Image (cartoon, helix red, strand yellow):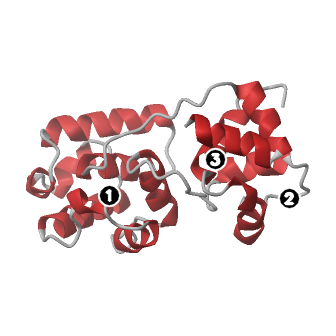
Amino acid sequence: MRKAVLHLKKSDPVLRGIIETVGPCRMDFREPTFENLVRSIVYQQLHGKAAGAIFGRLAAAASPLTPASILKLRPQKMRSLGVSPQKLSYIRDLARQTRDGEIVFESLSGLPDSEVIELLTQVKGIGEWTAHMFLLFALRRPDVLPVGDLGVRAAIKKAYGLDALPKPSEMVKLAEPWRPYASYASWYLWRSLDVETL
């Protein structure tokens, strides 16, 4: 991580300012499991507190949270826990694909980023953003640039003085000097939004 931070400070003066203001990099990682991908689906487009409560109820009802335990839960029961009909279908699709061996969580760490994205986005309701978050925070990949993340886009707009939110192609170009540590740059950009002085 130290090597990554030094690289970012040296390669981008704007990022150097953000790093010096934010301080040490403290990324919170999760395990690359079925349960954590279900958590990501529950958290999509929801406030953290509400999502946490729903996920807590779902995890308790399905305990331990596995593809089999999800598929045993009746859809009405999942709805009563606060899972929306849309997310219910996403979670059940993920459970079916995992049960059927189409997604093998234990093998994901050996695959390149592009293959992980391709595999995960075959699941209904898992888009590029969720796949990027899984790569970044579960598989701990160092060079993920979540081009669809509103927080990262807003932070880039603010830090680099842009007139509008950057398009994915602009982000890729801007991130060139960050390679191969775009994940750490993204983390610092998220944190920069919490710092008033930037």
Which quadrant would the C terminus be assigned to in this image?
Answer: top right
- Residue type at numbered disc 3: Ser
97 lies above or below 152:
below
Q: Is residue 143 left or right of residue 162?
A: left
Instruction: Characterize the local packing of mark 3: few (<14), some (14-19) or many (20 or more) Cα atoms within 10 angstroms.
Output: many
Q: Is residue 86 left or right of residue 74?
A: right
Query: Is disc 3 placed on a helix, strand or loop?
Result: helix
- In percent of width and height, residue 26 lies at 54, 29
Instruction: Characterize the local packing of mark 2: few (<14), some (14-19) or many (20 or more) Cα atoms within 10 angstroms.
Output: few
Question: Label 3 belongs to which residue?
Answer: 186
Q: Is residue 184 left or right of residue 94?
A: right
- In percent of width and height, residue 12 lies at 80, 47
Question: Label 1 belongs to which residue?
Answer: 109
- Residue type at numbered disc 1: Ser
Q: Is residue 56 visible?
A: yes
Choose the circle earlier in sequence order: 3 or 1. 1
